[in-house]
Image: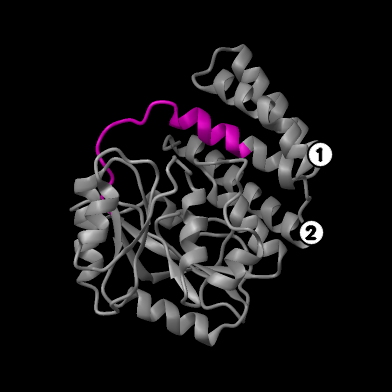
Amino acid sequence: MITRDRRASLLRTLDRLAALPERSAVVVVDNGSTDASSAAARAHPVGARALYPGRNTGALGRNLAVRQAITPYVAFSDDDSWWAPGALATAADLFDAHPRLGLLAARTLVGPEQSDDPLNAVLADSPLPPEPDLPGRPVLGFLGCAAVVRRRAFLGVGGYHRLLFFGAEETLLAYDLAAAGWGLAYVPALIAHHHPAAGHRPGRTSVVRRNALLTDWLRRPLPVALRHTARLAAEAAHAEPGAAAALRGALVRLPAALARRRPLPPPVEHSVRLLEAGRRTTVKGARATGYEA
């Protein structure tokens, strides 16, 4: 779990994790909190191991936590999310039974109403063909606070990429796991609960778009990266909200992305294109029926 300056939410999540029948070990990475979150985590009855790197490590805090784990499988939570009773035991059984499985994406229920996160439907409708050695629908995406990984697979690909820091970092990890031969599957029987704080997070949209473009430059064919860069530049020129900031952020980091560029193997790139084609079809259908998101 990663946390930063949300002590009350952290303690609520630790309460939920402590109540799970699996009694799993908990590692908390405090990303530079100033509200005594680390001390609160260490004092909590769940017996969490609290890491304090002394700065905000973003999503890389999850890498730190996985390195400290001693179990073969690791489940992620944020300080506002937790797992349903029995979900982690089910996940462990699935990993035991499917040696190529590298990541399980769970069904995420949001808030006290337990409404489905919109990503659930996207994952459930994945156009990727079934794979007999995976326990659910193959996917190339997941929600960071609702996933379980095989520790060896996660560390083998380097975990979350340091260039992205935070924001839509899951896609690149999914690509890297698939490129290394690991399977990713959505299993809706696994339930994670997410209770995000109300309110808009300023700058979030531009960071997500920046990281999406950097992911293209890191892993996609050059024509794809160039096309998406041109599209973002056009949107910036038309003063679309967040586009200029996203473009600037990506261009500053572009030399580092090019130095770390490693295009996807053709089968994985083919899967990415299948997903993109599915999204285009969904958008066209939404426009035709008046329900465009």
Image quadrant in which you'd find residue 254: top right
- Residue 86 vertical placement versus 119 (above, below): below
Q: Are marks 2 and 1 in contact (CB under 8 Å)?
A: no
Which segment is the magenta one? 194-212
| Circle 1: residue type | Leu
Label 2, secondary structure: give it: loop
Q: Is residue 182 above or below residue 212?
A: below
- Taking the image as shown, residue 158 lies to the left or right of residue 41, namely right
Q: Amino acid at mark 2?
A: Pro
Could you say where residue 7 lies in the image, as x and y percent from the top left? Answer: 23, 46
Q: Residue under circle 1?
A: 222
Residue found 57% across the figure and 52% down from its top: 160
Spot occupied by residue 95 in the image (x, y as percentages of width and height): 51, 80
Q: Is 286 in front, or is 178?
A: 178
Say which residue appears at 27% left-offset and 69% top-offset: 84
Q: Secondary structure at mark 1?
A: helix
Residue drawn at x 49%, y 19% is: 241
Q: Nearer the viewer, residue 56 or 13?
A: 56
Image coordinates of residue 189 in percent, x first then y, are 37, 73
Q: Is residue 198 magenta?
A: yes
- The correct choice, above or below, for 137 with respect to 251 in the image is below
Q: CA distance from mark 2 to mark 1?
A: 14 Å
Reply yes or no: does residue 104 show up in magenta: no
Q: Look at 36% across and 31% down and name the residue there.
A: 201
- The image quadrant that residue 1 belongs to is bottom left
Residue tagged by mark 2?
265
